[in-house]
Amino acid sequence: MSDTTVSDSGHRLKPLAPAMLRELSVRSNLRGAAQSLSHYGLVVLVGALIWRVSSTWGVFWALPLMAVQGYLVAFLFMAVHETAHKTAFKSRGLNLVVGYLSGFIIGLPYEYYCLFHWDHHRYTQDPDKDPELVVGVKPTSDTQLALAYSGVLQVAGRLRLMLGHAISGKVTVPWIPDNKRAVIVTEARVYAGFYVALLVLSLWFSSALLLWVWIVPLIIGQFFLRPYLYAEHTGCERTRSAFQNTRTTYTGAIVKWIAWNMPYHVEHHAYPSIPFHALPKLNGIVDGEIVHRGRGYIRTTRETWAWFRRHRQAG
C-alpha cells in the first residue's frame, strides 16, 4: 500500500499519522489564555495611551496610536475565528466567552459567524456555496477594488445584515439552517441592543472615549485586515484540496502572533481540529506539500491585487 493518498483534485498528500494528529489536536486553556489575554492586554494598554495623548495634546497626535490600535482590534477577528472552531481553549465555556466578546467588539455576531465559517470550510472556493465568495465584493473598477481592500464595504455589509436580522426577524441566507434562524435573530437583537446602550451612555456623559479608542481604530484596522484575508484564498485553485485551494503566507513573528498563527492557513484548512498554537509544528511536517506560498503580506497583496485585476478584465 502506498504511503501517500490522493485528494479529490489529484494532489498527492502524505497522511498525518493518527498519533501525531492526536498530539497536535490537544487543546489548552493555558495557551488560549496566554494568547487572548496578551492580545486584549495590548488593546487596553494602547487604548489608555490614546485617551491620555488625545486628552493632553489633541486627537491628531493620537492618530499613530489609533493605527496600532486598529491593527490590534481588527485582528480580534482571529479570536472569533479560533473560538468558532472551539480550539482556542479546552473549555467550551471559555471559547464562548472570548468568541462572543471579540465578535461584539468587531461587529460580527458570533453564532452567525460560526455557521458562516462552517460552510466556508465545507465549500472552500466553491463559487456557488462558499459564503466568502457568495457575499464577497466583486469589483468592476480600480476604485471599487481599492474600496474592497479598505474593508469598509465588508464591515458595512455585515452590520447591515445584522440590523436586518434584528429589525425584520427574518434570516434568508442559505448557510443558516432553519433550526438556527431564531438564534441568529435573537443574537442580532442582543448585539444591537448593547450597541445602542453604549451610544446612549456616550451621549449622556458627552464622552468620545469609545469613538477614539474603539470605533475609529476598528475602521482603520480594516485596511490591515482585509488584505490579510484576501491572501488566504485569492488566486488559488477551486478544488477540494486544502493544499491547492488555500495559501500559507510566510511572515514575521509579530504578524503571526497578532493573527493567532493563521498565516499557516493551508495547515488550518487541511486539519481544522488542530489549535492555533500547534500550527507552526504542523507546518514543519507538511511544508513540502504546500502549493501556494506567500512571501510576506506586502508581496502577497500585490499578487492578489493583480489577480483581481486580471480576473475582472478576463470577465
Image: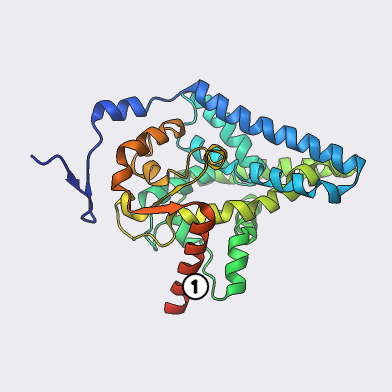
| Residue at position x 38%, y 39% in the image | 272
Above or below, comparing residue 145 to residue 234 in the picture = below
| Residue at position x 11%, y 41% in the image | 2
Above or below, comparing residue 153 to residue 48 in the picture = below
Q: Can residue 168 be seen in this view?
A: no
Q: What element carries label 1?
A: helix
Q: How many labels does the image show?
A: 1
Kind of residue at disc 1: Arg
Above or below, comparing residue 309 to residue 179 in the picture = below
**Label 1 neighbour load within 10 Å: few <14, some 14-19, many 20+:** some
Q: Position of residue 171 (x, y in %)?
A: 54, 53
| Residue at position x 34%, y 39% in the image | 271
Does residue 14 appear to the left or right of 33 in the view shown? left
Q: Where is residue 247 in the image (x, y as percent from the top left)?
A: 40, 52
Q: Which quarter of the rendering shows the N terminus? A: top left
Image-quadrant location for residue 210: top right
Q: Can residue 14 be seen in this view?
A: yes
Residue picked out by circle 1: 309
Does residue 304 appear to the left or right of 67 in the view shown? left
Q: Where is residue 137 in the image (x, y as percent from the top left)?
A: 54, 65
Image-quadrant location for residue 314: bottom left
Does residue 82 appear to the left or right of 40 in the view shown? left
Q: Position of residue 202 (x, y in %)?
A: 85, 42
Q: Which quarter of the rendering shows the C terminus? A: bottom left
